[in-house]
Image (cartoon, coloured by chain):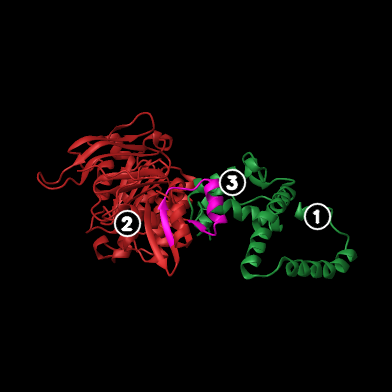
Chain colours: A red, B green
Amino acid sequence: MTAKPESAETVAPFAAELRDVVVRYDRDGEPALDRTDLTIPAGTITGLLGRNGAGKSTLLSLLAGFRRPTSGEVLVGEPGSLEAAYENPWASMNVQLVRESGDVWGDERVSESLSHYELLRPAWDADLAGLVLDTLEVDRCTKYEALSRGKKSAVAAAVGLASRAPLTIFDEVYLGMDAPSRYAFYDLLLADYAEHPRTIVLSSHLIEEIERLFEHVAILDHGRTLLSEPAEDLRGRGTSLTGPADVVARHVGDRRVLSEQRLGRTAQVAVLGSFDAAQRAAAVSDGLELDGVTLQDLFVHLTATDVAPAQPGSGAPVAQPQEER
Amino acid sequence: MFDGPEPIYVQIADHLRAQVLSGELREEEQVMSTTQFATTFRINPATAAKAFNGLVDEGVLYKRRGVGMFVAPGAHETLLAANRAAYVAEVLDPALDRAEVLGIPLSTVLDHVRRRASAARPAAAQTSAPAQDPRPDEVTS
């Protein structure tokens, strides 16, 4: 029904890059982003994690070109030809950010809002939008502002998925949904991503239920990139040792301890860093049990207030103190 | 499913190997596509692909271009051999270590093994023993 650029289908998944980005909302206050560097690999589902106030939403609105950084560069585009995101029609046509507020017009029917997006997004799939709304049980004749929080989130999900933008960003849109709706959304997202590869960025606090969707994970902390690496590498970063406390302590060595629990003479210690085959065998033959550390646990430990950040890519031991800000 | 602490691709590969070993997945049978796998188990398709590619390198699966992934001929035997080779170190030794902790003498364990062996013998004699049936001396080698 609309004149769509012929090239719509040929736009490759976008990469995104932040170089030394500072965002300051207030001259004297702490910056929201503080000399942040970050690369989001093209074609991945990337998880952006961070505690409240870490700078996630600021970072995502930069990628969408919604704001200009105070300093530094924000680049998006097909790999090898990145362009500044701000005031760039090509970028804004191909980057879709949805937030929990829905980014739709409150006093219009849902169907009208979606028809605006259909004009805006070259690869818009109206059938997919319909499928998402039907699956999440949204009445598209209702005005957006009259919808419940969960249904508003569902509209945002429909906009984000149906846009099929080469860079699609969901900024915690699922928080308003109940658990069955969230799982339905994850299923819709995975199924459509598998058929139509693109770069998808998801920010969420619900790490445990969403982490398996990620191929890449970036953690923001106090306006800085704490780490950015393949999700599978991150899952292998921590090791938990369980056994007699003195034996555990001997095998922990000088690795950085993330958490420690004691039950009588038994200790369970989570450390940063992996164990090679020989170290593992030595620990097991001394009667220790070795396990991984979940992404959620790693995240909690790494972003805990008094813990210094990890040195990405380096093995154990990691004891690099955080640079003073 | 796949909630363990190991990387998910490792868990997926283990799961598929176990299915081939148990015969749930037969040789030349098509396995789920990475897309089906990803949507069924809510995991990233790249994670599923990583597991599948590892199994292709191991010779457990093979690709038919444009069709999908299949269980390789001989995969069952290969996995059987690998698991048998690891049996002593991964299963038997820990069991014997446990016996030591509990103060069960090795002779008691051996008596039990002998009883099992003599109970199993008549049954094994009735059916034609499979060629790959592990002999006791193979296990202890």
- Mark 1 highlights which residue? B137
- Mark 3 highlights which residue? B52
The type of residue carrying mark 3 is: Phe
Instruction: Evaluate if marks 1 and 2 touch, with contact meaning CB atoms under 8 Å apart.
Output: no
Instruction: Evaluate if marks 3 and 2 touch, with contact meaning CB atoms under 8 Å apart.
Output: no
Residue at mark 2: chain = A
Q: Is residue A58 left or right of residue A82?
A: left
Instruction: Evaluate if marks 3 and 1 touch, with contact meaning CB atoms under 8 Å apart.
Output: no
Does the image show residue A141? no
Circle 1: is it few (<14), some (14-19), or many (20+) Cα within 10 Å?
few
Q: Is residue A274 magenta?
A: yes
Does the image show residue A228? yes
Circle nearer the viewer, 3 or 1: 1
The type of residue carrying mark 1 is: Asp
**Helix, strand or loop status at disc 3:** helix
The type of residue carrying mark 2 is: Val
